[in-house]
Image: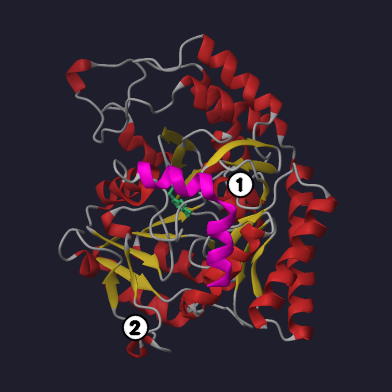
Amino acid sequence: DAFTQTYVRSTPASQQHYRRTREIIPAGATRSLNSWPPHPLYLTGGDGARVTDLDGRVLTDFLNNYTALVLGHAHPEVVSAVQEAAALGTSFSFSSTLEQALGELLAERVPSMERLRFTGSGTEAVMFALRLARAATGRTRIAKAEGGFHGALDETMVNVRAGSSENRGSTRPRTVPDMEGLTPGVEERTLVLPFNDIEASTALIKEHAGDLAAVILEPVLGVGGMIPATESYLRAVRDACSEGGIVLIFDEVITLRLGPGGAQQSYGIAPDLTVTGKTIGGGMPIGAYGGRADLMALLEPQGGTDVYDAGSGGPRLYQGGTFTGNNCTLAAGVATLKTIDPETYTELNRQGDRLRETLNKEAESSGLPLHVTGTGSLFNLHACSGPVTGFRDAQDVAGDLQQALFLGLLEEGVIVAPRGMGCLSTAMTEDDLRFFQEKVLGVAERIDA
Ligand code: PLP
């Protein structure tokens, strides 16, 4: 309550803006969901590691547009690339040559993406990858991991009901739709695999192998609490998919910021298809999916000829969109990937590893309600003493404590997600990291008191 009152007192301009905005936009902001009580924080600008809110307060941004910004806000190389592209025309009805440039940069970094296509968002990339898997296998069902988030598609918006006693410890947790309005029966069509439970997951995959088109997995659960898969888990799922002729899709929308080749590079495990987005657009809307050339061939004109032959029919699958592969996004992506060198990822990951280690050590020795999960430059602050080893643990953290942590950090000038997700950017200095550490421990102490 004290945290909420302080938030209201320090954000009068946002509050006023909210009152009028919600007359046209439900909840007052498209991205607010219900997680920003008592009103959203409106931002007016960003530069490097900082953002400015409507009240003129400058905050350090440890969320970086939900992990999309590796270089921080308004990086000069990215800004000028977008300006140059925009001056030549923002988007066309036909293709931009920059698609090849960004495609080559991505395929070079992620070798399992033998062929790839761009989309307008990560959600779209997931949608098209799942459709491709269904077309390739002739099967209908998909499986996802418990706590996995893949955008707001009907078929991936099912999960287990965390915190319910019927699911506690269960290896076959009952699945439920995440929200109202989803296609009826979606909780039966999408199978939910207990994350990091090899026995339970492989048993489910084997049992349903005959009608499973795809298994889609984040190598590190992102929104589900920033919890890395064990290597043996990914390997077991990989093997079960190969045996069952099931398309394994890694959702690297977030994890491509862990290295040039994403999480699959560090685990040394290649999926059949990869879905990505966020970082590769340098802050502009983007998604991409790609993988085995034989699967991606479904997007070629039928007959697979080099010369388009109207008589042979179009591709078996349509994929595109009015703004897909637009000039500005592609230019921002090319500039971003060219600016980040491999050592950059290593250094960011090293900083992140050290930060989590220090915070956990301090929190544990002082008995604070704080536990930090994650890997490399990605983290999640949980307002509990831990351990947090799965989605159910993460969801079980008391909502009011988690919100106090979020609002307390905002008050101190630090942005993380309402559920505690965050990441580092190259715009941050050692001072910023010390500042973060100090503020996180300070707020955890206040919550504890
Ligand atoms: N997949 C994962 C792992 C994500 O975290 C997200 C978004 O947060 C998506 C897919 C959806 O991407 P987008 O928001 O670009 O549609």
Up the image or down, 349 lies above or below 448; here it is above
Q: Where is residue 330 in the image (x, y as percent from the top left)?
A: 52, 26
Type of residue at label 1? Asn
Give the farthest residue toward the right. 430
Name which residue lies at 75% across and 41% down.
427
Q: Which element type, helix, strand or loop, lies under badge 2?
A: loop
Instruction: Answer yes or no: disc 1 within 8 Å of ligand 1.
Output: no
Q: Is residue 211 left or right of residue 436?
A: left
The verdict on residue 5 being magenta is yes
Do the residues bearing badges 2 and 1 touch, measured as CB atoms within 8 Å? no
Q: Is residue 31 left or right of residue 114?
A: left
Segment colored magenta: 1-21
Q: Which element type, helix, strand or loop, lies under badge 1?
A: helix
Q: In which quarter of the image is the C terminus?
A: bottom right
Name which residue lies at 75% across and 71% down.
359
Task: Between residue 285 and residue 249, name the one nearer to us.
Answer: 285
Q: Position of residue 407 (x, y in %)?
A: 58, 63
Q: In this view, does 256 lie to the left or right of 167?
A: right
Give the farthest residue toward the left. 184
Kindly tell me whether residue 364 is visible in this rendering: yes
Residue 172's mark? 2
Q: Name the residue under label 1.
A: 64
Give the farthest residue toward the top. 88
